[in-house]
Image (spheres, rainbow, N blue to C red):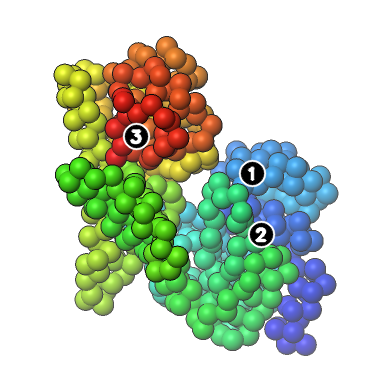
Amino acid sequence: MNMKETLLTKIRNKEIIVGVVGLGYVGLPLAVEKAKAGYKTIGFDVQAKKVEMCNRGENYIGDVVNEDLKAIVDSGMFSATTDFSFVKDVDFVAICVPTPLDEHQQPDISYVESSTREVAKYLKKGSMVVLESTTYPGTTEDLLRPILEEGSGLKCGEDFYLGFSPERVDPGNLIYKTKNTPKVVGAIGKDATEVISEMYRHVLDGDIFEASCPKVAEMEKILENTYRNINIGLVNELCMLCDKMGISMWEVIDAAKTKPYGFQAFYPGPGLGGHCIPLDPYYLSWKAREYGFHTSMIESSMMINDNMPSYCVDRAARVLNGHKKSLNGSRVLVLGVAYKQDIDDYRESPALRVIDKLNETGAEVVWFDPFISEYYTHDGRHFTGEKELTEELVKSADLVMVTTAHTNVDYDMVQRNAKAVFDTKNAMKNVKNRENIELL
């Protein structure tokens, strides 16, 4: 049999050994699903602590069921290592490493590049390699392919298959997880697309859309998140206008979403957070400049969203002014540092920028998050939150600022004991007494 038929047969017989590079929010859930589907899986990560926890069956990702991880570890279907030489034993490699921005807001694909070089050293003939990390169009073909070919001595399409299948992880989503979210696959060559898609079909319940090439799959992922970035930028800008006009943007959105077609509700807030929406548009804008193209709409939305932490701090100052207090010297209690409700993920959280800007004004800032007890900034600073949200803590603050809409917070208690509240997320929408609440 040729490589295509051999791999298809191994997939159907569950003889494929899977490797997942990067055991974070994307990689670990994927590795768990691969192993649960009956494919022996090896996880690779440079962080020894993560590897040790995985091998003990100790979960650290919210979207992974603790019992599932322990079961696949105990059964021998999943193990983790820092030693990339074990790539020589796998048939399918998924690269799921971070793709952040550097200090100049340009794509940092160093993690992708270094991981690919490690994979290339041990890549065997008859393997599949799939990049799942979000990146700019052209990464798979222009960066990964030459690295893999030069490092392994193998030829793409003849000795191994290479493709891109963007992750669609939404931490905290109670309906869509890795298992049931539809997948997009774009690979180099028709055979590669067919085989890689078949691999995902044997593991996931969601539909598989086969794109014509990696660039289409890379671009569609950017489109998904740029679409949200632009629409959130629109409502954030209109929120600022509505404030000047004395209109509630939240009520405007509630009215607009009664239309059963042609409108999807997006909501304002203190900024954008997470691993995709705040970052992905920068990847596209950066790549567009290579073609002499200016993505004006995208860049405008990014400017609006990036300015929201500053705008919210200015609004907080205005709230305090109404109580004859200055932000400088006032005690501000920030509720929520996670980037979205009911999760423990603070990556790119706008709440952290709000806290920094409050500190810059001279405010005394304390914070509480029911899911997060401490956080570290990119420059290594460490911050510890309050252990409990008590009446005394709320009463001690000149202003309570809600920056994450966690559902397990007693907002009625907050309202009863707060001198003033600035709710940037409409988290307190069900609180009836609103005399001391100002809404973004």
> In percent of the image, x 61 and y 40: which residue is there?
60
Of the 4 image quadrants, the one containing the N terminus is bottom right
Q: Which residue is mark 1?
A: 51
Q: Nearer the viewer, mark 3 or mark 1?
A: 3
Q: Residues within 10 Å of mark 3 (few under 14, many from 20)?
A: many
Q: Which residue is mark 3?
A: 423
The three-letter code of the residue at mark 3 reads Asp
Cα separation, mark 1 vs mark 2, equals 22 Å
Q: Earlier in the sequence, mark 3 or mark 2?
A: 2
As helix, strand or loop, the secondary structure at mark 2 comes to loop
The disc placed on residue 179 is 2
Q: Earlier in the sequence, mark 1 or mark 2?
A: 1
The residue closer to the viewer here, 2 or 233, is: 233
Do tag 3 and tag 1 residues touch (Cβ < 8 Å)?
A: no
Left or right: residue 58 versus residue 96 is right
Q: Earlier in the sequence, mark 3 or mark 1?
A: 1
Query: Which x, y percent locates residue 68?
Result: 74, 47
Q: Nearer the viewer, mark 1 or mark 2?
A: 2
The three-letter code of the residue at mark 1 reads Val
